[in-house]
Image (cartoon, rainbow, N blue to C red):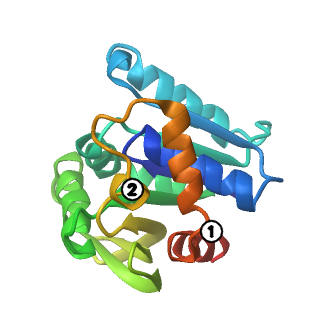
Amino acid sequence: MKRLFLSEGSNDTTFLSLFIKEHYPMLDTDRLDISNGDAGSMMYKESKKIREFKDPRDDHEVLIKSENGDENLVRFLGSKIPDLLRMDLDFYVLIDLDGKDVASRLTQFENKLQPHSPGKSFDISCGREIVKTHYMESYVVNVQIDRRDIGNFNLLAFCEDLEDAADIGEDESDQDIIEDKISDILERNQITAPVKRAFSD
């Protein structure tokens, strides 16, 4: 089964790419980072990438995609969750909780779904907790439309944020230093356990 990872920013995709390279090096991985400069071509670029990834002839087993910020991730998921759950793939969402609880973040996705399907009721809720540590949490998230189960996805969440866990400053721009710091936190079981368990769940 192919796996699609959706995340907020490029540091998240770096984290996921390094994690997979370290723990699952046999998997053929592709990556797409949406940036500020993609405004005109963003929709075409991401649609093309996901379409290619879904194609059975595509060799990639994992696609890691960032949305250029939390608001964009919430908006993308709010419009695409039903479509993603219909695809023949497992999908995962990596978010920062910023000290909030998981339920409040899921409510954001739920609220964004409603305008795309007027007249339908949505319920996005935490099902089973996979692993919870001081730094990260992982869950199976259930999705219902009109009280009917349509599927689930795996949620990976930093309790604060990745930058806090890796001690990456707001002004840090050197990509080599950022990668080194992210590599360092992959040595911590409290970081990797929630991701590994969700990945193999």
At mark 1, the secondary structure is: helix
Q: Position of residue 26 (x, y in %)?
A: 83, 53
Real-space CA distance between mark 2 and mark 1, rounded to the nearest whole angstrom: 18 Å
Q: Residue at x 31, y 46 (%)?
A: 79
Give left or right: position of 74 versus 31.
left
Q: Nearer the viewer, residue 186 or 36?
A: 186
Compared to 37, does 151 lie above or below?
A: below
Give left or right: position of 83 versus 57.
left
Closer to the eye: label 2 or 1 = 2
Q: Residue at x 29, y 64 (%)?
A: 160
Compared to 84, does 134 lie above or below?
A: below
User: In this orientation, does residue 15 appear?
Assistant: no
Q: Residue at x 73, y 62 (%)?
A: 23
Q: What residue would you read off at disc 1?
A: 199
Q: Position of residue 168 (x, y in %)?
A: 38, 47
Q: Position of residue 2 (x, y in %)?
A: 68, 54
Q: Residues within 10 Å of mark 2 (few under 14, many from 20)?
A: many
Label number found at residue 103 = none
Q: What residue would you read off at disc 2?
A: 162
Q: Quadrant of residue 9?
A: top left
Q: Quadrant of residue 162?
A: bottom left
In the picture, which quadrant includes the N terminus? bottom right
Which mark is first along the chain, 1 or 2?
A: 2
Specify the amino acid type for callout 2.
Leu
Q: Position of residue 117 (x, y in %)?
A: 23, 51
Q: Nearer the viewer, residue 125 or 191?
A: 191
Specify the amino acid type for callout 1.
Phe
